[in-house]
Image (spheres, rainbow, N blue to C red):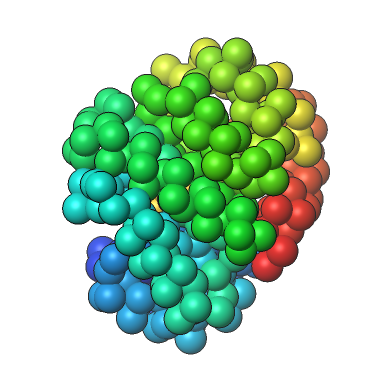
Amino acid sequence: MIDSHCHLADEVFAADLDAVVARARAAGLGGALCILDASSADEAKRAAALLGVWPDVRFAVGVHPHQAGPFGGRGSAAADAVSAAIDSQPATRAVGEIGLDFHYDFAPRAAQEEVLASQVGLAAARGLPVVVHARLAEARTLEIIGAEGQGRVRGVFHCFTGDADLARAVVDAGFLVGVGGIVTFPRAAELRDVIRQVPLDRVLIETDSPFLAPVPHRGQRNEPAWVARVAETLAGMHRVPEGEIIERTSANFRGLFHP
């Protein structure tokens, strides 16, 4: 089992990282993809410590749309920062998380689009997949990825919460759908209906730790071990053994990220 999206280099895990990793291994996790902020030297240091504790972890490095503001008018600087971060961490397997967030608009939309475009171009040049964050901007995100990636960039739309039309568009564009703890929420029946329509060979499971803890852990700090609850929920939705979900999503992860 693999957690395809977590933030284990976040400072909230610094005090008990060994215990968090031990619980992940005890839950059957064989690895995880940890997301890093390309502009954070502190996260880079914590990533090195994480790799020492959990050699099977891999990384995605990017400039999140929330942090795009300082790069407005100089998108290439964002790509340069990501490129340098990739070079300094050999266990990097993707560019991300990158994208557009027109819900919070913590950065000007023009800056978000410029930074996204530059990072997709970098992913294409490096032959790396992308980890996508898109909120109220999914169509525009796909448009930019298609244009800047020239049809060569693939990846995953993480923490997917869109409708059936968006799911089809994501899959048709060659991307995978990241399913997290929200799918376990009692009021997420519509999302479960959408996810049920996504072919299992296009699904990844994730926690987005420390955020969005699944049932029955809502309100707590999320952690990779709890990705098992997502696998369990998917198994119930598809009426297949949980082992099949774990096997399929792990194979999908390996096929995309080549860990």
Q: Quadrant of the C terminus?
A: bottom right
Q: Is residue 189 visible?
A: yes
Residue located 32% across and 71% down the image: 43
Horizontal arrangement in the rendering, residue 230 relative to residue 98 (left or right) = right
Compared with residue 48, is residue 85 higher up or lower down, i.e. above or below? above
Name the residue at the bottom extreme.
52
Residue 73 x, y percent position in the rendering: 25, 47
Is residue 61 or residue 53 the one in the foreground?
A: 61
Compared with residue 57, is residue 166 higher up or lower down, i.e. above or below? above
Q: How many marks?
A: 0
Residue located 36% across and 67% down the image: 81
Is residue 137 or residue 78 the one in the foreground?
A: 78
Q: Quadrant of residue 77?
A: bottom left
Residue located 56% across and 56% down the image: 123
Residue 52 x, y percent position in the rendering: 48, 86
Residue 230 x, y percent position in the rendering: 56, 40
Q: Is residue 3 visible?
A: no
